[in-house]
C-alpha cells in the first residue's frame, strides 16, 4: 500500500481541501472495523484493494488491529489462520466476488471453527448479494461507504465503471443515487451549495434527490459551515456525446486513450525505462513485464505536463532538461562552505526531478510512437471532417475502409456514432448502409449492439434538420485557428474542437444563468434547470470579501468524463481574467473506446480489444528520444 505522504500530500493544494474527503473515508473504515475484535485478517477483492490504496496506507490498517491482508482469490490456508480472532471481508456486491469470498470462508472453516466472520460491502449491499450469503455464519454484515475517491486537489471520482450504460441501457439508477449521496457528504464537509445548475434527465434526477435529502437530513440540524462552494453544475453525459467520441490530444488524455489510466496509475512496458528509475527486483525473481507509474500532481513535472497538448510536451521537456543541467553545473562554481552546504540540500530535489524527467521522456516517446503513425493521424483528420462539415448523407471513406479491413469493431462504431452525433443523425439511407456493411463483415449479432447505440442517442435517423450546426456555431465548438502550443482557447484539447460540456460550464459561470442560450439548450436532450438553496443569513455574513471575489464551482459529470475535459476546465481557471476555481467530480472516466465496449459488451462472441496501443504493431524499441527532438505535428 502507498505511504501516508504519497497519499495525502497533493489533495490539500486546491481552493477547498479535498484531503477532508479522504479523512472521511478513513474514519468510515475505522468505524467499520471497530465492530470486529482485535487481531483480525482483512480479505479484499482486487477492485476494493485498488481503491483502498488511494485513501489509506498499511500502517493505518495495522493500527485498526489488522494483522494480515489478503486478496481474493486467496491462497490455501494453513494453521496460521487460527491466530486470527476475526476474518473481515471487504468486497464489491458482485456475484463472482461474493462467491469467491464464500469459497475462502469455507476453506478457513476447514482449518478452524473458532474464527468469527464479518463482511462489509463497498459501497452498498444489495438484496441479491444478501441472498447469496449464508447469513447466520457472519458476525457482522455491513457497508463501507467508500463512494468518493479523491484523486487530486481538484478531482474526485466515484469509480463506477459503466455508469453511462447502467442508467441509459439497463435503467439502473444506482450510480445517480450514489452521486446524490456524495453531494450530501460534500455539503456536510464544505457547506450548502447556494446555486445549482444542470442539464439532462440524469442531472434533474440527482438535483431532485439532493433537495429532498436536504429536507430529510438537514431539516433540524443545518450544517453550521460557511459555504465554500458557490455553484454546482450537473452535466448528464447524454447531453454531450460528441466529446467522448473524439480522440483526446492532451498528454494525460492520450495516456488514457492509448494505455488506460486506472486509479491514477498506468502500466507501461518495463524494458523501455532506464534501470535507475525502476523498482528493484528481489534476487531470484524474474522482473515483471510492466512498470506502473503514479500520475498525480504530487509529482511536480506531471502537474506541469498533463494538461498540455501533446505537441507542446517536447518543448516543456526540453526546457526542464536545460534547467536541471544548469542546476547540476552550478557545483563547479562553488567555493564557500555555505554555498556547498546549500547545494547539498538541493541535491535530493534535483535527483527526483532528474528521475521524473527520465520517466516522462520515455512515456512521451511511447505516446508519440502511436500519435506519429499515419493511421492515427488519418483518424484525427477524419474526426475533424466528421465534426466540422455536413456529413449526414454520404458514407465516410475512412469508415468504409476500416470496415473493409475488419478493424476493431469499437473503432468503426465510434466513428459512425461520431458522424451521427455531429450531424444530429444520419439520413435513413446512409444509416442502413452502415448497418448492412457492419453486419456483413462482423456478423448479425452486432445488430443488438447497434440497438443499444440507438437507445442512448449515439445512432439515429436525422430529424429536425441541422440543429446541431446551430450549437456548433453559436457555442464556437469548432476552431480552425487553434494554437496548440500557446493556446488561447479550450479547443486546443482536441486540436480544434472545444468540448460542448465545458462550453456550457463556461457560459453558466460567466452569466450565472442559462440566459442567452435558452433556444440552443432545447436542441440538447433533457431538461435545463437552475435552483437556489437557502443559506442562513449568519453564514452568508461570515463569507469574507476574498471569498466573494473568488468563487469555487463544482462541476459534476454523470455518466463519466474525459481527462481532456478536466484539462479544459483547468485551462479556464488559469486564465488571467478568471476568478473561478473548478472542482471536478465524475462517476468515472471515459474514452470513446470504453464507451463502445460498455455498450456492446453483451454482444454474443464479442471480445473487447485491449488499450489503443494494442491496435498498432510497434516497431523496434527506442530509448534515445531527446526532449528537443521534433516529432512532427498532428494536423
Image (tube, rainbow, N blue to C red):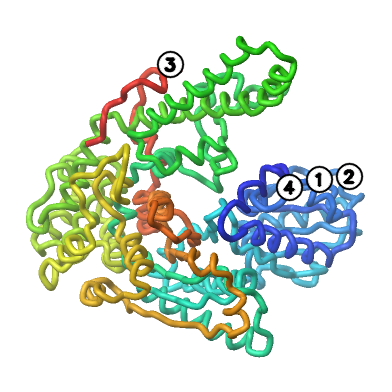
Mark 3 vs 4: CB contact within 8 A: no
Mark 1 vs 2: CB contact within 8 A: yes
Task: Name the residue beneath numbered marker 4.
Answer: 57
Residues at marks 2 and 4, CA–CA distance in whole angstroms: 24 Å
Pick the quarter of the image with the N terminus: top right
Q: Earlier in the sequence, mark 2 or mark 4?
A: 4
Classify mark 4: helix, strand or loop: loop
Q: Is residue 117 above or below residue 284?
A: below
- Return the mark for residue 80: 2
Tell me which residue sits at (45%, 54%) in the image: 589
User: Residue 486 is drawn in which quadrant?
Assistant: top left
Residues at marks 4 and 1, CA–CA distance in whole angstroms: 25 Å
Q: Would residue 414 be visible to someone looking at this image? A: yes
Residues at marks 1 and 2, CA–CA distance in whole angstroms: 8 Å
Task: Name the residue beneath numbered marker 3.
Answer: 624
Which of pointers 1 and 2 indicates the residue nearer the eye?
2
In this rendered view, identify the residue nearer to me: 177 or 5: 5
Residues at marks 2 and 3, CA–CA distance in whole angstroms: 51 Å
Mark 4 Cα-neighbour bin, 10 Å: few <14, some 14–19, many ≥20: some
Pick the quarter of the image with the C terminus: top left
In this rendered view, identify the residue nearer to me: 244 or 500: 500
User: Residue 85 is drawn in which quadrant?
Assistant: bottom right
Tell me which residue sits at (66%, 26%) in the image: 346
Q: Is residue 492 above or below residue 17?
A: above
Classify mark 1: helix, strand or loop: loop
Task: Name the residue beneath numbered marker 1.
Answer: 77
Amino acid at each position: 500500500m502507498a505511504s501516508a505522504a504519497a497519499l495525502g500530500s497533493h489533495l490539500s493544494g486546491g481552493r477547498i481541501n479535498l484531503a477532508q474527503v479522504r479523512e472521511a473515508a478513513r474514519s468510515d473504515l475505522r468505524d467499520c472495523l471497530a465492530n470486529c475484535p482485535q487481531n483480525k485478517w482483512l480479505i479484499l477483492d482486487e477492485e476494493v484493494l485498488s481503491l483502498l490504496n488511494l485513501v489509506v496506507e498499511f500502517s493505518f490498517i495495522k493500527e485498526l488491529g489488522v494483522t494480515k491482508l489478503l486478496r481474493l482469490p486467496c491462497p490455501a490456508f494453513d494453521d496460521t489462520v487460527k491466530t486470527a480472532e476475526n476474518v473481515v471481508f471487504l468486497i464489491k456486491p458482485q456475484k463472482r466476488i461474493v462467491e469467491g469470498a464464500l469459497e475462502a470462508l469455507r476453506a478457513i472453516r476447514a482449518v478452524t471453527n473458532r474464527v468469527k466472520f464479518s463482511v462489509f460491502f463497498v459501497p452498498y449491499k444489495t438484496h441479491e448479494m444478501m441472498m447469496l450469503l449464508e447469513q447466520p455464519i457472519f458476525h457482522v454484515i455491513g457497508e463501507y461507504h467508500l463512494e468518493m475517491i479523491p484523486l487530486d486537489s481538484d478531482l474526485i471520482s466515484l469509480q463506477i465503471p459503466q455508469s453511462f450504460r447502467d442508467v441509459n441501457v439497463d435503467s439502473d439508477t444506482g450510480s445517480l443515487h450514489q452521486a446524490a449521496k456524495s453531494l450530501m457528504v460534500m455539503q456536510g464537509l464544505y457547506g450548502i451549495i447556494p446555486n445549482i445548475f444542470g442539464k439532462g434527465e440524469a442531472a434533474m434526477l440527482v438535483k431532485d434527490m439532493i433537495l429532498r435529502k436536504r429536507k430529510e437530513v438537514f431539516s433540524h440540524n443545518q450544517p453550521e459551515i460557511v459555504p465554500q462552494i458557490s455553484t454546482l453544475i450537473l452535466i448528464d453525459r447524454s447531453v454531450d456525446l460528441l466529446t467522448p467520441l473524439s480522440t483526446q490530444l492532451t498528454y494525460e488524455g492520450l495516456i488514457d486513450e492509448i494505455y488506460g489510466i486506472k486509479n491514477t496509475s498506468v502500466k507501461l512496458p518495463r524494458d523501455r525505462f532506464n534501470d535507475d528509475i525502476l523498482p528493484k527486483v528481489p534476487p531470484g525473481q524474474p522482473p515483471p513485464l510492466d512498470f506502473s507509474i503514479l500520475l498525480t500532481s504530487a509529482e511536480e513535472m506531471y502537474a506541469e505536463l498533463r494538461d498540455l497538448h501533446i505537441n507542446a510536451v517536447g518543448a516543456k521537456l526540453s526546457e526542464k532538461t536545460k534547467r536541471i543541467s544548469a542546476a547540476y553545473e552550478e557545483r563547479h562554481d562553488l567555493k564557500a562552505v555555505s554555498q556547498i552546504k546549500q547545494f547539498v540540500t538541493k541535491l535530493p530535489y534535483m535527483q527526483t526531478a532528474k528521475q521524473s524527467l527520465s520517466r516522462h521522456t520515455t512515456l512521451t516517446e511511447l505516446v508519440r510512437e502511436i500519435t506519429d503513425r499515419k493511421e492515427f493521424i488519418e483518424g484525427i483528420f477524419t474526426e475533424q471532417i466528421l465534426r466540422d462539415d455536413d456529413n449526414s448523407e454520404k458514407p465516410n471513406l475512412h469508415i468504409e475502409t476500416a470496415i473493409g479491413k475488419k478493424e476493431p469493431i469499437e473503432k468503426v462504431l465510434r466513428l459512425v456514432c461520431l458522424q451521427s452525433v455531429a450531424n444530429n443523425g444520419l439520413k435513413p439511407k446512409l444509416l442502413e448502409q452502415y448497418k448492412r456493411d457492419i453486419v456483413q463483415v462482423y456478423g448479425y449479432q452486432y445488430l443488438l449492439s447497434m440497438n443499444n447505440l440507438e437507445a442512448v442517442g449515439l445512432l439515429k435517423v436525422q430529424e429536425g434538420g441541422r440543429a446541431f450546426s446551430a450549437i456548433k456555431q453559436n457555442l464556437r465548438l469548432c476552431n480552425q485557428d487553434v494554437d496548440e502550443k500557446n493556446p488561447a482557447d479550450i479547443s486546443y484539447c482536441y486540436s480544434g474542437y472545444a468540448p460542448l460540456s465545458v462550453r456550457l460550464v463556461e457560459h453558466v459561470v460567466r452569466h450565472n444563468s442559462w440566459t442567452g442560450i435558452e433556444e440552443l439548450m432545447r436542441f440538447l436532450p433533457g431538461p435545463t434547470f437552475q435552483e437556489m438553496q437557502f443559506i442562513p443569513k449568519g453564514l452568508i455574513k461570515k463569507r469574507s470579501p476574498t471569498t466573494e471575489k473568488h468563487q469555487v464551482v463544482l462541476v459534476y459529470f454523470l455518466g463519466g468524463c474525459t481527462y481532456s475535459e478536466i484539462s479544459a476546465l483547468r485551462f479556464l481557471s488559469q486564465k488571467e481574467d478568471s476568478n473561478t476555481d473548478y472542482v471536478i467530480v465524475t462517476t468515472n472516466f471515459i474514452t470513446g473506446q470504453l464507451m463502445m465496449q460498455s455498450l456492446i459488451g453483451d454482444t454474443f462472441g464479442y471480445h473487447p480489444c485491449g488499450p489503443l496501443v494494442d491496435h498498432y504493431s510497434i516497431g523496434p524499441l527506442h530509448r534515445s528520444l531527446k526532449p528537443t527532438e521534433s516529432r512532427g505535428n498532428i494536423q
